[in-house]
Image (cartoon, grey):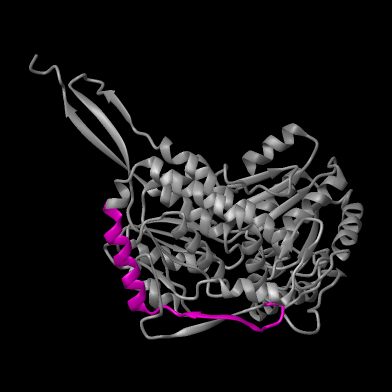
Amino acid sequence: MTITAEAMTITAKDERALLARVPTGLFIGGKWRDASDGGTFNVEDPSTGEVLLKIADATPADGEAALAAAAAAQRDWARTAPRFRAEILRTAFEAVTARADDFALLMTLEMGKPLAEARGEVAYGAEFLRWFSEETARIAGRFSTAPDGNSRLLVTKRPVGPCLFITPWNFPLAMATRKIAPAIAAGCTMVLKPAGLTPLTALLFAEVLQESGLPAGVLNVVQTTSPGAVTGPLIKDARLRKLSFTGSTGVGRRLIKDAADQVLRVSMELGGNAPFLVFEDADIDKAVDGAMLAKMRNGGEACTAANRILVHESVAEEFTAKLIDRMGAHTVARGTEPASKIGPLVDEGTRTKVHELVTDALDVGATLALGGQSVDGLGYFYEPTVLTNVPPHARIMHEEVFGPVAPIATFATEAEAIQLANDTEFGLVAYAFTRDLYRGFRLSEELEVGMFGLNTGIVSNPAAPFGGVKQSGIGREGGLEGIDEYLETRYVGIADPFGDA
């Protein structure tokens, strides 16, 4: 199989050969095994609806076994040398990078994104392994003399303990590495429940970690079609000490409530409703480039996607015309096709929701400038779509549209732009294009978000803290802050060593 930036030639034989190498069991206590009741489920190709693989379907008993394995491994794993953990992460980074073609194709098959995008995710996801391998040996505390001089203060960092990770379907590798890498670095054991729509990448990654020397029980993987039945008892189990979830705000709220009973540490990366602001002094060509990145990355199936494009009325006509040209030039095709720029949406439910939001916007007064329909034939394809004159009360301005749809509205003043941008319960990310440096700083302080892209359409970076405010979540992933989510602070008070001198 050959996958390069210049030519991406994939045959059915290549696909079958890769799928034959993907583990299909549960990964518990360092061993691959069937579900306790023998149950399985199908993983489908969203571009055709055909079955890719039949894999083990975890039961509540399997979930309990996974947590038991993690709890049993926790003490020894926490006591391993930081350098040992770091070397496992570095080895895994090199292994994922060496197998980039396999991971890219597998994500394209089970999630639908074009191969070029999948390769980008491999590089992004692998970088978390390298970043946290470098942070592992930098976990530190402090030692000081108490202000009154009568004692010494020793502060240390310890792993929080066994963790439960629930990851989404849209970035099958990166969402796993973004949680697993800092947990390994900190000395925590884990149970991973990957999304039922895209579990294959997680299974292949678990195999890579096993081959990279990760001890048995440190990572356990339990894919299932009954996520509530499997994860619910784990969240109520006293052995679990942390829950990290990436997904919708509605599910996140319920998980936070459930986690309260055990007072679990929680990290929640939830929904987004990102505004993309284009001011009158912006470089319009660069703003269109940024909008294409912010809107069309992953076909729009990203929590960081530009959901509301707000353009100053004086440049709206020029910006809109150029955005329509760019989006209209995108080829919609199966992700393995060399010309593909937009693959299928992940399932029929997602496509139906996208079309409902488009239809609602048109019903309340928006104008259809491009697209607006499902693509006939196999798979869950949807046309690149641009809506203009979208009124503020349209559902699409308040609900995430996980698809290739760009809703455009206008503003007249900076104050109005900020008001429109902040008019949402979400606060994950915002983008703005302006040549005015002072305006950029004002926006960085006025916009109610956890991340802000100034004159750029992409902010995600393993070296930066990822996360939001308001109902977009709690905690941060990546950056220097990412490892702190997996560490507890312990204070030791020591009597004055000169007290009896």
Using the image as rendered, state which of residue 9 and residue 239 is in the foreground.
Answer: 9
Give the quarter of the image for residue 118. Answer: bottom right
Q: Quadrant of the N terminus?
A: bottom right
Using the image as rendered, state which of residue 62 and residue 397 is in the foreground.
Answer: 62
**Residue 9 x/y as whole percent:** 78, 67
Answer above or below: position of 338 versus 12: above
Horizontal relation, residue 188 to residue 279: left or right: left
Q: Tally the numbered discs.
A: 0
* Residue depicted at 46% across the width and 58% down the height: 211
Horizontal relation, residue 292 to residue 428: left or right: right
**Residue 408 x/y as whole percent:** 80, 60
Q: Quadrant of the C terminus?
A: top left
Judge whether residue 466 can be spotted in this image: no
Give the quarter of the image for residue 22. Answer: bottom right
**Residue 237 x/y as whole percent:** 29, 67
* Residue depicted at 62% across the width and 62% down the height: 103
**Residue 457 x/y as whole percent:** 73, 49
| Part of the protein shown in magenta | 46-75
Q: Residue furthest left?
A: 500
Horizontal relation, residue 27 to residue 15: left or right: left
Whether residue 62 is in magenta: the answer is yes
